[in-house]
Amino acid sequence: MATNNSVNNSSPYISAHSIVLSQGASNQTGLALTNGQLAIGSTGLDPVAANITPGTGISVSNGAGTITISSTGVGSLVWNDVAGTSQAAAVNNGYIISNVGQTTVTLPATAAEGSVVAVSGKGAAGWVLTANTGQVIHLGNAASSSAGSLTSTNQYDTVMVLCVTANTTWVVQSLVGNLTVS
């Protein structure tokens, strides 16, 4: 007759909402988990309760019965529709210009190396991507002046710029169309 099983356990109490752990020939114990935790194994030892740790370009959000893993890198730009004629850009955001008049998008004054900003035209008059004082935008071997700009020449021109020196230097990473550098 089994004397140490889940029906006849010599351990009188395992916490509610716990995962049951077998202790081999000894009693069973419980492993309580909090929001987003998993039981992580370790050879020869009991599993431990742990959260997934995000790496570069990844975020992890833990909730009751959920774990959400998201990319925070270039592929995960937050796209914003711009209906007005001016827009202050935020790092790692893209802007779809839908105004019929030309829209000016101003780069963020503060940006860490590796930050990106993208602008894509939809409105008939296009857009201007403007740098702040002390900032320069490089397109190939052409560079804007300090507080200079890139200007679209066609309705659907698109550009993505990458900050290569914190706060000051932006480089065109990709583009569709013909841009004017000033």
Image: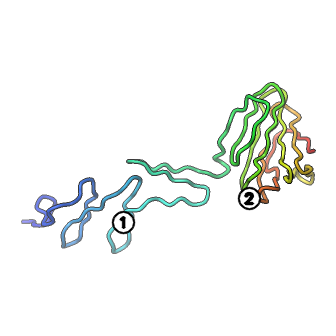
Query: Residue drawn at (57%, 55%), measured in percent from left and top?
Result: 58
Relative depth, front residue between 62 and 39: 62
Query: Residue drawn at (24%, 54%), measured in percent from left and top?
Result: 16
Residue type at mark 2: give it: Glu
Residue 175 in the image: x percent, y percent?
81, 44
Residue type at mark 1: give it: Val
Q: Which residue is mark 2?
A: 113
Relative depth, front residue between 12 and 26: 12
In which quadrant is the N terminus drawn?
A: bottom left
Nearer the viewer's eye, disc 2 or disc 1?
A: 2
Relative to residue 93, is residue 20 depicted above or below? below
Q: Quadrant of residue 134?
A: bottom right
Q: Residues within 10 Å of mark 1 (few under 14, many from 20)?
A: some
Residue 98 in the image: x percent, y percent?
75, 28
Is 9 on the left-hand or right-hand side of 18? left
What colour scheme does the image use? Answer: rainbow
Is 165 on the left-hand or right-hand side of 64? right
In which quadrant is the C terminus drawn?
A: top right
Residue 19 in the image: x percent, y percent?
28, 58
Q: Quadrant of residue 123?
A: top right
Is 73 on the left-hand or right-hand side of 158? left
Relative to residue 165, is residue 133 depicted above or below? above
Is 52 on the left-hand or right-hand side of 164? left
Query: Residue drawn at (86%, 50%), measured in percent from left and top?
Result: 133
Q: How many marks?
A: 2
Relative to residue 157, is residue 90 depicted above or below? below
**Label drawn at residue 48:** 1
Residue 41 in the image: x percent, y percent?
37, 66
